[in-house]
Each structure stands twice: as structure tokens, then as C-alpha cells.
Image: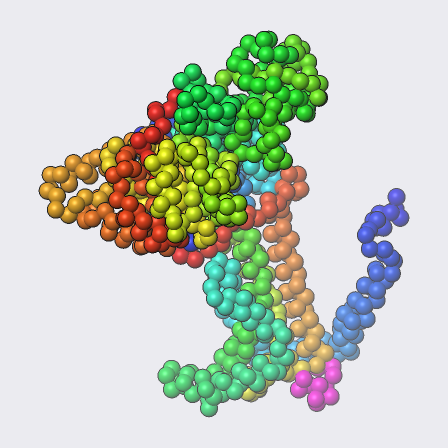
């Protein structure tokens, strides 16, 4: 019995081989470097470690990295939801194009988006000039620039997580709530939002995690002023350039810790929502989605 | 009246999916809307609930006009096919939802929840999540939830569609019981006739957006008015018969006196067929001899197919093998005692009797494409309108080439275009009751204009129009035209006549249509109305073909050859239908 416990018969042959590859690649590419990072950090004493990670410049960079990533993720959660909503619920000319465009920040080398943003938002740039003139806002080379870059990078995460959840949220549910006397706001708050919330939280967390680690697109638009617009990944690069490998490793360890916590949070949210919606399995079979013309209201 | 629908019409992309439906449902009545998928029944139900806006007509619930009231203020309970339970809420929260949004006190909510869970026999399930319940239980919750706010009517859209047969039957009984207990006016939509028979006080059969017939289940089964209902509710042999002074006969052999026999459509239910060894043993009316071609044992009933003798009854629609010269196939079903009395085997010769037949009151029996040569006749049969009508009415389209002495039985069809007016004149003066002028190509009409040249032909014309409109997804307008010079008082009388005709048509044929009275000349007003729509068709009634201005008819028929025209000659029209 013990042997067959994890050797379930499977369509794919070669269980030993595939598991071996999985373990090998995970070890070589994920676990080993991370272990090396932690090991490197341990060559510092506690006080040295604290000196590096609690340095004024480091603290300012955490504030910027995490603060900007949080704001950007929050903005994305809001607008990403609207984008996903319009893509799922309405039929309009160019919908497929917009849908494809969402993935562009995924596909684009981040440096390219960084340069593009910097060009547009620079004080002499096409948008930068107008923002300066009309509102007196400077975007490039301030923390605002960092936020803008992170919004661009994080948008696909939110849209792509929310989209399937919205597709799955059946129109029936809204109509049922409506016939039971719920106002449109109540329908949104009590029916749509709870159905989409786990996906939205996942998207938010992913956009946030990505924002914290983002380097390429930010460095061009942030201006990289120490204590002001310097993000943590940049600080690591600076430390490396000064051959301060241990310092870089210490900062890297901090980021690893945060990433791990993020991942944990995502998984917790996901398992919670699975339990909530799929049930324990006794008769909790999912009802297939109803094919109904989507544009009943939108097409009019 | 609990629910009143008045000429409800809903269009998608210009095509009506619910077409002029008028319906009254009494307090506590259980109405089942039955129809094949795509017949518009769900759309109609959604229109009653306010989930779909309607393009035309009026909806009233308990005397309150709710046409422009949104669904949350209509106070209806709606049950969806896939339950539509809120999956993130417990059963209790689901049921209380309607009360919560109404800000009912929590103690009252709890009491109502308990009461409802007891009603659907799910006590103690309050804290479960929908995903932890079986499909049947989920649908019970959905019913309880729909009843929580004490709605005035309960609407159910295929509520058992996603459940398996056994649970379906059990839930059906529960629903019927709850409905009786609460005296709740209920409309249920289904495509399952067994379900309709089991639940309904009254069944409304829908097809292509129209409510074809509405009545008590047994009435609809024994005395259907339309081909569709007769074949959709149970099985039926549709046969072409000929009305004679001594009843309906099935042989097409010419009768004495040379009179064109009046063709009718008769239905013979499989269970009303009697099989005997020979003609003398037949206790009911002997029809013809036949040969048993297939026997299927099916438990309580035995199903047979009997090939009738070639001179026997003619089916309305030729069989799948298309060979009418081999005689038609008759569906027969027999109970066990019948089987014991007279066992049959495949290949055996039997005498066939009909215990009862029912003659459909439909004025259109079959079509005959009349043309000068075989190719033209073929082309006429293949024209979009005639082939669609033949297929949808499940009726025979015969061909006739060249000249005969009299018009063919049923409805002759001729091609529009040059020579059409002359052919029309010949048919109408040589015994044709109806005449269809068919454009050889072009799309099906979606706008039908009905006009009668005199008051006497109104009844017959509306009957034919009703029969036609059941099979064409078109909107109909009954146009009255009055010379512009007539006095105001005459106008009132004329309008009254039109509206009377409209309500008579609704009562007799279930056909509802818009009615309009216009001043002006007949030719001009008709032309104007027809030209306003790209795909229009004219139904023209007259009681005296001799009085038609043939020049005008010529311009009407040959001026726009892409328009179909149906002419009804009530001088020889159907006497009042009886069965």
C-alpha cells in the first residue's frame, strides 16, 4: 500500500522521470540560489545585518517600494476591475484588440516601457508639459513616476485574475437578486463583489508583489534620488556595484521575506475561496455556465 | 386576473422572438408555457418578470400596469433553471435575501425562513452552503427564496431542466403541492410535455414567438386547432381528408357530381386506430387495409407502423421515404388487452379502423404548385416561401402542370411576375378558395398586411391569415381603408367593425394583431403600407372575385414581383369548422 500511495496510475508515463526533473529544476533554479542568498546573509553578524537593513537609505527605499507598489496595486484593483468588467460584459468594436493590449505590459521588456513612460512624462515630454502647466504636477523623477510605472506593470495581473471570475459570475445571479428586490448597488455589493473578491484580492496581491520587485521600468522614470526616489531593487544594484555583496544579500533577504509572505497570502486567499465555492464535494458539482447572449443590455 | 398580457412583442435584431402574445392568467392558476427551444417562451417569462424589456404591448400584474416597472418592483418570484443561488451565502441567508433588502426585522426574517424551509422540506439546512446541497435540494432552496417576499406570482424557467428524471418527478409533486397550498398564480416554462400535463391547469403552446393555443390539457390533446399542437402534444397521424355530406373520407378518388372536394386536415391519434383481421370485424369506422411493417414492444403499449394501401389515406406530409404511391405509413399504438385480442406480426395484412378523428379547423390544408412546365413547377416548390411553408406546416406541396378544368384542392400556388394576374383570375373564378402568389426568390416576409375588400370576407380572411402567421415569424397589421370623403360617424362604425374583427380573430384563432383604420384609396394606402417594409406580404380577402378590378390586381401582382400575395375567396370559404 505504501508504494502505491504516491504512485497513482497516470496517463503520462514515467512518473519517476518527471518528478525527478521537477525536483531538479526547482532545486537548481529556485531553492539553491535562494539558499545561497540566505547563506550569504548569515555571513553578516546581527548588528551588521541590522545596520544594512535599517539604514536610513534602505528604510526610505522600502517606504517607496512598498508604498508605491501598494498605491499602484490599489489603483489597479479599481481600474483593472472596470477594465475587466467592460471586457466581459460588453460587446464593442475593438474589444478583442483591447483584450490583447492588456497583455502588452507582460510582453514588453520592462526597460522599454520605462523609457516610453519617461519620454512621455518627462518635464519636457508630451504629457509631462501639460500636467505641469495645468495642474502643476510633476510625474517623472518623483515618487508619482514610480507609481505610474508600477500601475502600467501591474494592470494585466488584476485584469487577468478578475476576468475569469466575472465570466463565471452568472447573469442569473444578478437577475435573481433583482427579482428579489435588490437595487443595482445592492446587487453589486452583495452579489457581484463577493463573487469576484477572491480573484480581485489575488490580482491585487500579484500586482503588489510584482510592483515591489519591479526594476527595469522604474529606474528610467524615478530619477533615482537617494532617500527620495530610490527603490529597494536599485539599492541592491548600487550595493553590488560597490562590491558590497553581503549588504546586497541582506537587502535581498528582506525582499525574499516579503515575497514569501505575499505568496502565502495569495495561497491562503485562494484556498479560502475554493473551500467557499466548491464545497466539500458531496453534490457540490459545478453547474456549467449558461450560454446566453451576453449583450442583452449592452447591445441595445 | 392575476397576469394580463396584451400584445406583448419582443424583437431581437428586428426579428420578433415574442410576437403579439396576449394572455390572461387567473388567480391561483398554474399555467405551463410549452414549446420547443427557441419558441420564445423563456423570453416571454422574462418579460413578465421585467428582466427583458418589451418592444410593444402591455403587462399587468394583479390589475397594476407594470409594463415600465423594473423587475425589483414587480413583486414576482422567479426560479431559474440553474438555481442561481448565491454561492457565498448560506441557505438561510439566501432565503432571507429578499427580506434583508426590504429591511425586515431579523426576528421576522428568521420566522419566515423557518416557515419556508419547512415548506420545501429542508428544515435544519440553514447554515449549509449551496455547494453542499444536491441539485434537487438547491432548486428547493431557490423556490423557497423566490417565495420569501410573498410575491403575487411565481415564475419558473425550466426549473427541473438540470435535474435527473427521478428527482424531477419528486420536485414536480412538491411544487404542485406548494402552489395549491399557497394558491399562488404560477407560470412555468418547459419543453417537456409530460411535465406540462403533470402540472398545468392550463397549457399554452408557443411556437416561433407566437402563443398558438392555450387551454386545458385534455382539450388541447383531444381538440387541437393547429398542426403544430397536434403533433407536439403526443403523437398524431396527420392525414388529408375530404369533407363530404356524410363525413370525412380519406380516399382522393373523384366524387360524383364533379365538385372539387373540400380538403381538410384530420388527425388520427395512434391510440385511436383499431386493427382487425378484416373489414367486417372493424367496430369503428373502416378506413382501409394495410400491412404491418414494424412492431415495437414498449412495455405497457405496443407501437406499430402500418403501411396503408395505395388508395388509402394520404398523409399531410409525405413520409421520409417520400413514396406516396406505396401508400402512407400509419403510427399505431395498442394497449395490452388489444394486443391479446388480436396479436399481429410483421407482414400481416390488417383492416384499419379509426375510432375518432379530429378535423383541424385550419383553413390551409395543402399546397399545389401550378406552373406551365415541370421545371417551373419545381422552381416554384423550391421558392423560399413555399418550401418554408410546406416544411413548417408539415404539409404536402403537390405539383400540377398545365391546364385543368378546375382549380386544385387546397391552396394553389403560382409564381409572381408576368402572367400572374391572369392565372390568379382563372383560379379564383374556377373554384379556388385561396390562392398564393409566390415570388420565386427572395427572403421570407416579416411584415404581413391584411386587408379585406368587403366585410363578408373578413372572417375567412382572418382565419387564413392566422393559419399563415402561425408559421411565418412576421408581424401582422390588419388595415382598414375608408374613402377619405366619408363622414365622421361612418368612421366610428368602421373602426368598431375592425376592432370587433380583431377580437374575434383573437378569440377564434388566437391571432393577435395590430389594427389600423386609414382614410384614402385602397390601392394607394395598401401600396404605401407594403412599400414601407422591405419584406412585406399582402393577405387580401374578397367575397366576390368577379368584382375585383383586374387591372388593379395586375399592377399589384406584377408590379412588384418580389412580394408574396395571398388571396382569400370567401365565396367558397370553409363553413364553420366542427370536429
Question: Is B485 left, or right, of B353 in this rendering?
Answer: left
Residue B159 position within the rendered picture, expressed as x and y whole percent measured from the top left = 52, 36
Residue at the image point whose x is 79% and y is 67% from the top = A26
- Residue B280 placement: quadrant: top right
Question: Is B521 left, or right, of A159 in this rendering?
Answer: left
Question: Is B338 left, or right, of A294 in this rendering?
Answer: right
Residue A91 position within the rendered picture, expressed as x and y whole percent measured from the top left = 48, 61
Instruction: Answer above or below: position of B294 versus B154.
Output: above
Q: How many marks?
A: 0
Question: Who is closer to the viewer here, B51 or A141?
Answer: B51
- Would you say residue A241 sits in the magenta stretch? yes
- Residue B567 placement: quadrant: top left
Main secondary structure found in the magenta portion: helix
Question: Who is closer to the viewer here, B519 or B176?
Answer: B519
Instruction: Answer above or below: position of A128 versus B302.
Output: below
Residue at the image point whose x is 75% and y is 79% from the top = A44
Query: What sort of colour scheme is used for the picture?
Result: rainbow
Is residue B175 something that shows in the picture? Answer: no
- Residue B161 placement: quadrant: top right
Question: Who is closer to the viewer here, B35 or A144?
Answer: B35
Residue B515 position within the rendered picture, expressed as x and y whole percent measured from the top left = 27, 42
Question: Who is closer to the viewer here, B377 or B575?
Answer: B377
- Would you say residue B65 sits in the magenta stretch? no
Residue at the image point whose x is 66% and y is 73% from the top = A255
Which residues make up the magenta segment? A237-247
Q: Quadrant of the C terminus of chain A?
A: bottom left
Is residue A112 something that shows in the picture? Answer: yes
Residue at the image point whose x is 81% and y is 52% from the top = A11
Question: Is A155 left, or right, of B293 in this rendering?
Answer: left
Residue B233 position within the rendered picture, expressed as x and y whole percent measured from the top left = 51, 28
Amino acid at each position: 500500500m505504501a508504494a502505491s500511495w504516491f504512485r497513482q496510475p497516470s496517463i503520462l508515463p514515467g512518473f519517476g522521470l518527471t518528478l525527478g526533473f521537477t525536483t531538479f529544476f526547482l532545486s537548481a533554479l529556485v531553492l539553491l540560489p535562494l539558499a545561497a542568498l540566505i547563506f550569504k546573509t548569515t555571513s553578516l553578524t546581527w548588528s551588521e545585518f541590522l545596520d544594512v537593513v535599517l539604514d536610513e537609505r534602505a528604510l526610505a527605499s522600502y517606504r517607496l517600494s512598498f508604498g508605491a507598489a501598494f498605491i499602484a496595486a490599489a489603483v489597479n484593483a479599481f481600474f483593472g476591475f472596470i477594465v475587466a468588467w467592460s471586457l466581459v460584459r460588453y460587446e464593442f468594436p475593438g474589444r478583442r484588440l483591447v483584450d490583447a493590449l492588456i497583455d502588452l505590459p507582460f510582453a514588453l521588456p520592462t526597460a522599454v516601457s520605462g523609457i516610453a513612460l519617461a519620454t512621455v512624462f518627462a518635464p519636457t515630454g508630451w504629457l509631462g508639459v501639460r500636467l505641469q502647466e495645468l495642474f502643476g504636477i510633476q510625474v517623472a523623477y518623483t515618487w508619482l513616476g514610480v507609481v505610474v510605472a508600477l500601475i502600467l506593470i501591474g494592470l494585466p495581473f488584476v485584469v487577468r485574475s478578475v476576468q475569469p471570475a466575472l465570466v463565471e459570475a452568472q447573469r442569473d445571479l444578478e437577475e435573481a437578486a433583482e427579482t428579489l428586490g435588490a437595487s443595482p448597488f445592492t446587487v453589486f455589493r452583495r452579489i457581484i463583489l463577493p463573487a469576484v473578491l477572491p480573484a480581485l484580492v489575488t490580482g491585487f496581491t500579484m500586482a503588489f508583489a510584482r510592483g515591489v520587485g519591479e526594476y527595469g521600468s522604474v529606474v528610467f522614470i524615478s530619477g533615482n534620488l537617494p532617500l527620495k526616489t530610490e527603490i529597494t531593487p536599485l539599492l541592491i544594484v548600487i550595493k553590488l556595484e560597490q562590491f558590497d555583496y553581503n549588504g546586497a544579500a541582506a537587502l535581498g533577504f528582506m525582499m525574499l521575506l516579503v515575497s514569501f509572505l505575499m505568496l502565502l497570502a495569495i495561497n491562503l486567499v485562494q484556498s479560502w475561496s475554493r473551500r467557499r465555492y466548491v464545497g466539500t464535494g458531496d453534490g457540490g458539482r459545478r453547474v456549467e455556465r449558461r450560454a446566453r447572449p451576453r449583450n442583452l443590455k449592452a447591445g441595445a | 386576473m392575476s397576469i394580463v398580457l396584451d400584445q406583448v412583442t419582443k424583437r431581437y435584431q428586428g426579428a420578433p422572438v415574442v410576437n403579439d402574445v396576449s394572455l390572461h392568467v387567473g388567480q391561483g392558476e398554474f399555467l405551463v408555457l410549452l414549446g420547443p427551444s427557441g419558441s420564445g417562451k423563456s423570453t416571454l417569462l422574462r418579460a413578465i418578470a421585467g428582466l427583458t424589456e418589451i418592444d410593444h404591448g402591455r403587462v399587468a400584474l394583479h390589475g397594476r400596469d407594470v409594463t415600465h416597472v423594473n423587475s425589483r418592483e414587480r413583486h414576482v418570484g422567479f426560479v431559474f433553471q440553474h438555481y442561481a443561488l448565491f454561492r457565498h451565502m448560506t441557505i438561510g441567508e439566501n432565503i432571507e435575501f429578499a427580506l434583508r433588502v426590504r429591511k425586515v426585522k431579523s426576528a421576522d426574517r428568521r420566522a419566515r425562513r423557518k416557515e419556508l424551509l419547512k415548506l420545501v422540506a429542508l428544515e435544519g439546512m440553514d447554515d449549509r452552503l449551496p455547494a453542499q446541497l444536491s441539485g434537487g435540494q438547491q432548486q428547493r432552496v431557490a423556490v423557497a427564496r423566490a417565495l420569501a417576499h410573498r410575491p403575487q406570482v411565481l415564475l419558473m424557467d425550466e426549473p427541473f431542466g438540470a435535474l435527473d428524471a427521478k428527482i424531477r418527478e419528486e420536485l414536480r409533486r412538491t411544487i404542485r403541492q406548494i402552489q395549491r397550498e399557497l394558491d399562488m398564480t404560477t407560470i412555468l416554462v418547459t419543453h417537456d410535455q409530460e411535465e406540462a400535463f403533470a402540472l398545468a391547469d392550463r397549457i399554452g403552446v408557443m411556437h416561433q414567438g407566437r402563443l398558438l393555443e392555450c387551454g386545458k390539457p385534455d382539450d388541447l390533446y383531444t381538440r387541437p386547432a393547429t398542426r403544430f399542437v397536434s403533433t407536439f402534444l403526443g403523437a398524431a397521424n396527420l392525414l388529408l381528408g375530404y369533407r363530404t355530406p356524410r363525413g370525412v373520407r380519406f380516399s382522393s378518388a373523384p366524387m360524383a357530381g364533379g365538385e372539387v372536394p373540400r380538403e381538410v386536415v384530420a388527425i388520427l391519434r395512434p391510440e385511436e386506430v383499431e386493427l382487425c383481421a378484416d373489414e367486417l370485424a372493424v367496430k369503428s369506422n373502416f378506413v382501409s387495409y394495410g400491412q404491418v411493417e414494424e412492431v415495437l414492444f414498449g412495455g405497457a403499449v405496443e407501437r406499430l407502423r402500418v403501411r396503408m394501401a395505395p388508395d388509402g389515406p394520404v398523409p399531410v406530409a409525405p413520409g421520409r421515404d417520400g413514396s406516396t404511391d406505396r401508400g402512407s405509413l400509419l403510427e399505431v399504438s395498442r394497449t395490452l388487452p388489444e394486443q391479446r385480442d388480436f396479436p399481429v406480426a410483421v407482414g400481416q395484412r390488417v383492416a384499419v379502423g379509426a375510432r375518432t378523428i379530429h378535423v383541424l379547423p385550419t383553413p390551409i390544408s395543402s399546397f399545389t404548385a401550378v406552373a406551365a412546365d415541370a421545371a417551373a413547377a419545381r422552381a416554384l416548390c423550391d421558392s423560399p416561401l413555399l418550401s418554408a411553408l410546406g416544411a413548417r406546416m408539415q404539409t404536402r406541396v403537390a405539383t400540377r402542370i398545365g391546364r385543368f378544368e378546375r382549380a386544385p384542392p387546397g391552396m394553389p400556388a403560382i409564381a409572381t411576375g408576368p402572367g400572374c394576374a391572369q392565372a390568379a383570375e382563372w383560379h379564383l373564378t374556377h373554384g379556388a378558395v385561396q390562392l398564393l402568389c409566390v415570388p420565386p426568390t427572395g427572403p421570407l416576409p416579416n411584415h404581413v398586411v391584411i386587408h379585406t375588400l368587403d366585410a363578408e370576407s373578413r372572417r375567412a380572411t382572418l382565419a387564413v391569415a392566422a393559419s399563415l402567421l402561425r408559421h411565418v415569424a412576421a408581424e401582422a397589421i390588419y388595415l382598414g381603408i375608408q374613402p377619405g370623403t366619408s363622414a365622421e360617424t361612418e368612421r366610428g362604425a368602421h373602426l368598431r367593425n375592425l376592432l370587433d374583427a380583431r377580437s374575434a380573430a383573437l378569440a377564434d384563432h388566437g391571432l393577435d394583431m395590430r389594427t389600423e383604420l386609414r382614410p384614402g384609396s385602397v390601392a394607394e394606402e395598401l401600396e404605401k403600407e407594403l412599400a414601407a417594409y422591405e419584406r412585406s406580404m399582402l393577405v387580401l380577402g374578397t367575397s366576390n372575385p368577379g368584382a375585383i378590378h383586374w387591372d388593379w390586381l395586375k399592377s399589384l401582382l406584377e408590379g412588384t414581383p418580389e412580394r408574396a400575395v395571398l388571396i382569400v375567396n370567401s365565396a367558397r370559404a370553409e363553413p364553420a369548422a366542427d370536429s
